[in-house]
Image (cartoon, rainbow, N blue to C red):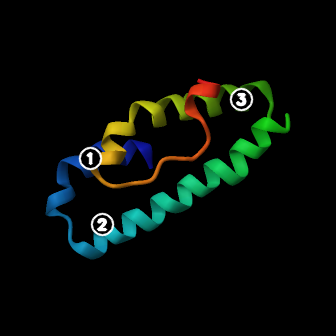
Amino acid sequence: MLEELDDNVTHWNEMSDWEQDDWHLEWGQFVNNVEYKLHIAYQSGQMTSKQQSKYKELLSKLKKAAPTLKKLNLSQPPVSLAEIV
């Protein structure tokens, strides 16, 4: 999803309403997975060190994408990005 974000911001105004709505729904699922699956696994120590590293990398990318997320009115994971990254 993050890889598509830059392309979407470039073409957002050209996308139909249903395409934007679809993206919002998919993004919401992605954010829920980050919060309710990945973050819980991270906090409970269920991740390997490699998974922890990839999770931190994901959060770092989400933190950098914050202005784009705001511009497209997309939600950010409610987990504290500053705590982990």
Residue 47 falls in which quadrant of the image? top right
Name the residue type under label 1.
Asp
Q: Position of residue 55 (x, y in %)?
A: 64, 34
Label 3 close to label 1 by CB (< 8 Å)? no
Residue located 29% across and 76% down the image: 18
Q: Secondary structure at mark 3?
A: helix
Name the residue type under label 2.
Gln
Q: Which mark is residue 7?
A: 1
Q: Residues within 10 Å of mark 3 (few under 14, many from 20)?
A: some
Cα distance, mark 1 to mark 2?
A: 13 Å
Residue position for label 3: 52
Left or right of 44: which side holds 80?
Answer: left
Q: Secondary structure at mark 2?
A: helix
Label 1 close to label 2 by CB (< 8 Å)? no
Residue position for label 2: 20
Left or right of 48: which side holds 31?
Answer: left
Q: Residues within 10 Å of mark 1 (few under 14, many from 20)?
A: few
Sequence order check, earlier mark of 2 and 3: 2
The C terminus is located in which quarter? top right
Residue located 72% across and 26% down the image: 50
Name the residue type under label 3.
Gln
- Mark 1 vs mark 2, foreground winner is 2
Q: Position of residue 82 (x, y in %)?
A: 56, 27
Q: How many marks?
A: 3
Q: Residue furthest right?
A: 45
Q: Which mark is residue 73?
A: none
Residue located 50% across and 61% down the image: 28
